[in-house]
Amino acid sequence: MFDYLIIGSGFAGSVIAERIANKLNKKILIIEKRNHIGGNCYDFKDESGIIVHKYGPHLFHTDYKDVWDYLSNFTEWEIYHHKVLAFIDGKKVPIPFNFNTLHKIFPSELAKRLENKLLENYQYNSKVPILELKKSSDKDLKFLADYIYEKIFANYTAKQWGMKPEEIDSEVTARVPVFIGKDDRYFNDKYQGVPKYGYTKLFEKMLNNKNIKIMLNTDFREVIKVDLDSKKIYFFNQEFKGKLIFTGMIDEFFDYKFGRLPYRSLDLQFNVIEKEYFQEAAVVNYPNNYDFTRITEFKHIHLTNTEKTIILKEYPKAYNPETDIPYYPIFTKENQESYSKYKDLANNFGNVIFLGRLAEYRYYDMDDVVKKALEVFEEKVR
Ligand code: FAD
């Protein structure tokens, strides 16, 4: 009945499904364990008209023109340049740390000196990972690096990951840069925005095709059996000879043969506040105070004219497989080694493609996962 089975309806699964349906005119079944499509990008409009991102704020940004053009087939965009403040020593200052932050925190003479030192050592409008700045031999830059490290980076990272910054792969720590310039925007990509009517509407349009059927509320293990010895896939007890695209957790696919891959999870607490606005920006980070890492106010992302507002506090926590969503793969050497064992096993399954942040056990931004899905379609599916 189906030529392709796809597990998961986030960007990884949905992009592949859309391509197969429209380009190859083949039949697809998407199996999704949640009661909605869109994976972690799912959003909804609350009764007052505010668009809320159910799994935390999702801001789209990319330098890939092909990805932007592709997604523009399914949505108009609301141009939105994300700005983040951090609550440091009683002040809310722009981050990533930039020249404006310098002048908000330090007396003007010191701020000017530090600015000049940064300009002497790094290119204007470039980003320097905090761990690199920390290695500087210049006394002033070292002072600055230690200040940023302590006030903005170390406690936030400890809260977010439950470990020291040094223990985490540089792929993750490089995400916290110092910006050599005055741009207060959180991202510097060429294309930035949010889907005008929300991500869920974008997904609905992407998957609106007679070739695509969607089975919600279904864990793939209820309908699919993976035989690790014969490398065969059974769908409702019949051998499935088509292609399976798997975007769930790779360790779950292999029944945790080599143990569970560790994840970090989040406790998300939403509050309705009876006033027009709660804070000055969409996101305010709290590196040093409180147990939560940040507060998001959704009205800043999709501007909405309402008397009340909705905020979200994120409390990072260890991942409990019984109760939690696996939000972030934890990048350590040891975890990468465990993942490679699963990857080697996956290579023996010729008719299964493993794609996305859970199946590849890596942090993908949305644009990266769309890019990868488009490439995988061209190289492995077509
Ligand atoms: P997912 O969206 O997780 O989709 C996987 C799907 O598979 C899910 O729907 C899941 O329910 C389903 N599934 C899993 N297991 C099974 C099973 N056993 N049976 C059936 N179905 C299953 N990226 C950005 O570019 N900008 C941002 O601002 C941004 N903010 C983020 C904030 C947070 C808090 C998080 C966690 C991520 C953020 N991201 C952001 C990253 C973004 O969410 C990912 O790039 C994107 O969701 C990856 O898509 P995916 O399809 O690989 O995974």
Image: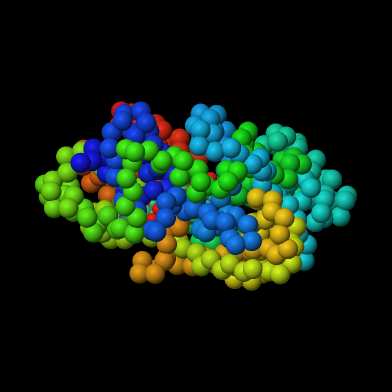
- Left/right of residue 25 with respect to residue 152 in the rendered view: left
- Left/right of residue 271 with respect to residue 350 in the rendered view: right
- Left/right of residue 139 with respect to residue 33 in the rendered view: right
- Residue with the most extreme right position: 109
- Name the residue at 51% across, 61% down: 161
Q: Is residue 101 visible to the viewer in this orientation of the structure? A: yes
Q: Position of residue 200 (x, y in %)?
A: 50, 49
- Name the residue at 32% across, 52% down: 215
Q: Quadrant of residue 273?
A: bottom right
- Name the residue at 13% across, 46% down: 239
The colour scheme of the drawn protein is rainbow
Looking at the image, which is closer to me, 199 or 142? 199
- Name the residue at 60% across, 55% down: 51
Q: Position of residue 6 (x, y in %)?
A: 31, 45
Q: Position of residue 165 (x, y in %)?
A: 54, 57
- From what the image shows, is residue 205 above or below residue 164? above
The count of marks equals 0
Q: Position of residue 330 (x, y in %)?
A: 44, 56
Looking at the image, which is closer to me, 101 or 50? 50
Q: Quadrant of residue 23?
A: top left
Q: Quadrant of the N terminus?
A: top left
Q: Quadrant of the C terminus?
A: top left
- From what the image shows, is residue 123 above or below residue 256? above
Q: Is residue 364 visible to the viewer in this orientation of the structure? A: no
